[in-house]
Amino acid sequence: MSAGFITGETLTITGGRLVDPGTGVDRLADVHVAAGQIIAIGAAPAGFSAERTLEAHGCVVAPGLIDLSVRLREPGHEHKGSLRAELLAAVAGGVTSVACPPDTDPPLDEPGLVDMLRYRAQQAGLARVHPLGALTARLGGERLVEMAELAAAGCVAFSQADAAVVDTQVLYRAMQYAATFGYCVWLRPQDAWLSRNGVAHEGEVATRLGLPAIPAAAETIDLDRMLRLARMTGARVHLCRISTAEAVAMIRAARADGLAITADVSAAHLHLSEEDIGHFDSMMHLAPPLRSVADRNALRTGLADGTIDAVCSDHRPLDDDEKQLPFGEALPGASGVELLLSLALRWGLESGLPLPVVLARLTTGPARVLGMNMGRIVPTAPADLCVFDPDGQTPVTVAGLHSQGKNSPFIGQTLPGRVRATVVGGQIVYGG
Amino acid sequence: MSLENPQLNARGALQHLLTIEGLPREIVLHILDTASSFVGIGERDVKKVPLLRGKSVFNLFFENSTRTRTTFEIAAKRLSADVINLNVNTSSTTKGESLLDTIDNLAAMNADMFVVRHAQSGAPHLIARHVRAQPHIHVVNAGDGRHAHPTQGLLDAYTIRHYKRDFSRLSVAIVGDILHSRVARSLIQVLRTLGTPDLRVIAPQTLLPAGIEGMGVRVFHDVDEGLRDVDVIVMLRLQNERMRGPLLPSAQEFFKTYGLTAERLALARPDAIVMHPGPMNRGVEIDSPVADGGQSVILPQVTFGIAVRMAVMSILAGGS
């Protein structure tokens, strides 16, 4: 090494198409990495010669993907998934940062649990892990957690995961308290009473199959409550897993009105609808439920026009015994972090969107939700990168999934795009 | 995902009976015609035919039902099958063995047929999918959640055909708790398959599932209006736990607003028949004089039910 500022491991990714939605760059360019950071784009700095070279001809070099909902199942649910397998699945999918919902057992409501999770994630040395603290103790919806302590331990926001805060007084106070310190509150709108016992979208399919239903209004009524409380408290609110057309319209209107909210959608909900339940396929039992084709189309449009900031996997590994049950008894959810890129690419192809727009919903969009300066390929930024072949294909098979959970509604399908290498902090953690 | 009909085999023959939905009209008619030939057997001194001799039929009732289980048991015995009754009166989420483990164990005992009742919609589909590598095993849905009760739908169709002959000009009204009723869903589907032009469901909004019109029925909230000039009235059972709560205020008010009385029956055609899948709540959905009256065919339904179940079982397992 001749240049003094270059220390540690060095890497050059050559010949790839650099697509960085944050800067609008879309051109053939080499990327040079040292000491975990991007140090130059295009020509190498004088005297720089990388120890490793990653050949990326025909591939896209994008910022590492940021997935806003990945369950690592630790602590407490190790039979469903394991931190190492899920993080391996993440990097196999080009995902370099994951936000983890607090619905572990026990829930992430104490700094010690967060410390342990972050330590375990660091030991794994794969994707970066950003824990979400529980918004209320034990996710019980009654008592506030020590938000400042949890933030100090590394929680990036506070969430109830799937648990409702039924008592609106508690939700109001939790949002006020979070707003006091500038913490973001992540909420999935679903009225606890209207959704009680429901397993499928209220409509013709649930009626025909005799499945207990969850009306679209379960989402919009709760969303209305959340939007009003956001206005009252000034809390920054992130709305998770939007599933209905009307909710998309409500969020669009609220944003136009200047409300500080963001939103995400799960990748499965961009492609599937209630029709896919078919003959009680429990792989299609998701939370929120798969809704109508019109709802799905509105989600696709909302994500394209930026009403929805990010697409996430809502990764929920489950063990076979939890899915090999009658539809209503099967646990909801799908394993999907390693399919996130492919499902987003398919949405982009089907919607005729340019690649930078698709990648924005996987990088700058979720980075904005997290309020973190990441998801960009610029000098001094952490070298978190995803190298993928946009013309490649990913066949989805049980054996091919890295996640411990093999529960995917896309098993048997072939999806567009194939991840060739994933770089986290300058290290090639997958492929290469 | 595959949307092929899971109850037909590669040759288009009936492999399982899971639901009426997607069942070809010819198969429905074949079942009804076969049932006709079995009706007389029950009246003979020796009420047995050897069509299922040596076959093992397992009645797997994950939800209690003495009556339906008994009719399946009688049907199987009249076909000379060996019948094993299992009341698995626990939910698979609350105790040890999973549903599919139970099935694997019984399959290892060389079962030929599972007659399944389960509180969860779709449970018989799951079982049928699980045993698909063992084509000698047949699954009959004896009622799953709110989804389907195909043998009940078929016996209702048999009864209607017996009394009315032709479906092509019929008006049929189904009254009561449509929301939770697998009987209503299967009946609607079988009557549609047989070309019934006027299907009505009559209930308060709280007892109707969203989008029921999509199944090809007209919705009435006013019972008097809905019953006018119909040929067939099917009253549904109202479960005890639903008589008081968020769906209905009381059994009395339900009887007053939807119960079938002689006055209301008079609104239908003079030769209209009255049906009920049983067990009846007298004075809740139906008045005793109507239940026991000359237009009631509720007991013949039970008799025909055995013949229809014999037909289904013999078509599934009798040929092999």
Image (tube, helix red, strand yellow):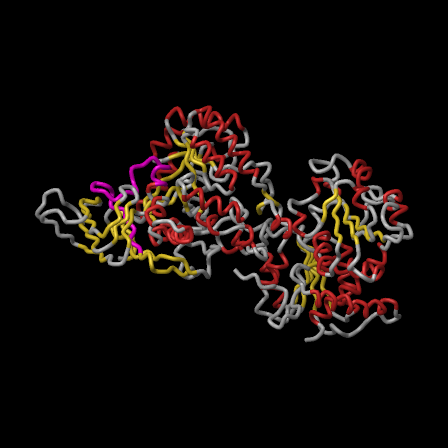
Residue A144 seen in this snapshot? yes
Relative image position of residue A211 (x, y in whole percent): 62, 49
Check residue A412 for magenta coloring.
no
Vertical position of residue A180 compared to residue A428: above or below: above
Q: Is residue A348 left or right of residue B241?
A: left
Q: Nearer the viewer, residue B53 or A258?
A: A258
Residue ID at (55%, 32%): A166
Specify the quadrant that holds the C terminus of chain B: bottom right
Relative image position of residue A152 (x, y in whole percent): 33, 31
Residue ID at (86%, 50%): B269
Q: Is residue A162 left or right of residue A59?
A: right
The magenta span reads A365-388
Q: Nearer the viewer, residue A131 or B307?
A: B307
Q: Is residue A217 left or right of residue A180?
A: right
Residue A120 seen in this snapshot? no
Relative image position of residue A114 (x, y in whole percent): 37, 38
Residue ID at (56%, 36%): A191
Vertical position of residue A245 compared to residue B292: above or below: above
Q: Nearer the viewer, residue B93 or A393?
A: A393
Check residue A379 for magenta coloring.
yes
